[in-house]
Image: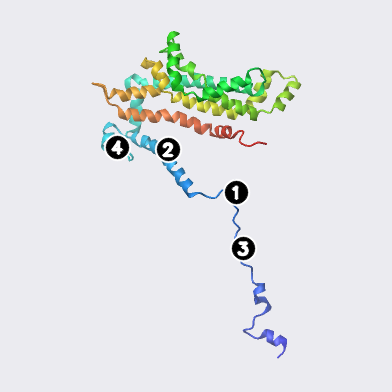
Amino acid sequence: MTADTEAAEPGRPTAAATPASRPAAPQRRKRRPHTPLNPRPSIPLTLVTGLVLVYTLLPLAWLLINATKDQKGLLDSFGLWFANDTHFWDNIGRTLTYDDGVFVRWLLNTLLYVAAGAGGATVLAVLGGYALAKYEFPGRKAVFAVVIGAVAVPGTALAVPTFLMFSSMGLTNTPWAVIIPSLISPFGLYLMWVFAAEAVPTELLEAARIDGSGELRTFFTIALPLLTPGIVTVLLFSMVATWNNYFLPLIMIKDPDWYPLTLGLNAWNAQAQTAGGEAVFDLIITGSLLTIVPIVAVFLLLQRYWQSGLAAGSVKE
């Protein structure tokens, strides 16, 4: 039998059917090694993060759910589930109109304190931080030590001396008693100092001066745009601190017409414990929900600036 006959016999493998000619099996994709940029997943860390997330969102969920209930529903239903009837929009209307619309007055007072106090604190922090970062002058290290020391001092420790000082000047029970102390932000000044030192190249400022640009023009046209992320970060921190400020207005303000939202809601809460007082827990919860909406909205709108501001200076070029 010839070789051609043998190749043609059935049952014998031909050249086309040999293992070498079969399509190669797909190779398993090689897993990337774990590095600091591609860390190994940590189950304990994931569980802890989940617990922190639940701890953070659970009060907000409770607030949102109970803002849909009336006074009776708050007492008769489970706190983390809705009642049979929904009174959300009715609660909002009653909150805004209760006691001749005093809630709106408290909201406007809070906006005034935030605009004047937090806005002024941001302006002073930007000017002071830029000057400390980019100018050399005698006593610069002493200023740095004072700022660091001021950051470590809690605000409650200064409350009583501040009250005595403003009382001697006759400024208590006025908006100035809340606005003026809010203008001082040692943490904001330190944050802008560090941010300006990294975000604004000294060579760029020197080039502008060589071209004949004055210091004010250099600051507003060159430095200020580069400082935008840091400015927004300081503004957000100052806004939250002023918006949630409770202790300072508590010792400074006695007239309910000048209360911020924090004191106003506390006054409604204390109203139920007063003899003959009306319990308005449904309005307190709805008012608390309305109180956090503006600050959450501001955070969401300015989130990209805030995140870039916190990350500034984390990488050394």
- For marks 2 and 1, the one nearer the N-term is 1
Residue highlighted by disc 1: 35
| Image position, residue 46 (x, y; %) | 47, 46
- For marks 3 and 4, the one nearer the N-term is 3
Left/right of residue 290 with respect to residue 9 in the rendered view: left
**Mark 2 Cα within 10 Å, few/some/many (few <14, many 20+)?**
few
Q: Nearer the viewer, mark 4 or mark 2?
A: 2
Residue highlighted by disc 4: 85
Rounded to the nearest whole Å, what is the CA distance between mark 3 and mark 2? 45 Å
Left/right of residue 224 with respect to residue 92 in the rendered view: right
Q: Nearer the viewer, residue 8 or 161?
A: 161
Dot 2 amino acid type: Thr
Dot 3 amino acid type: Gln
Mark 4: secondary structure: loop
Residue highlighted by disc 2: 56
| Residue farthest top in this picture | 169
**Mark 3 Cα within 10 Å, few/some/many (few <14, many 20+)?**
few
| Image position, residue 135 (x, y; %) | 67, 21
Mark 1: secondary structure: loop
Q: Nearer the viewer, mark 3 or mark 1?
A: 1
Rounded to the nearest whole Å, what is the CA distance between mark 1 and mark 4? 54 Å
Residue highlighted by disc 3: 27
**Mark 4 Cα within 10 Å, few/some/many (few <14, many 20+)?**
few
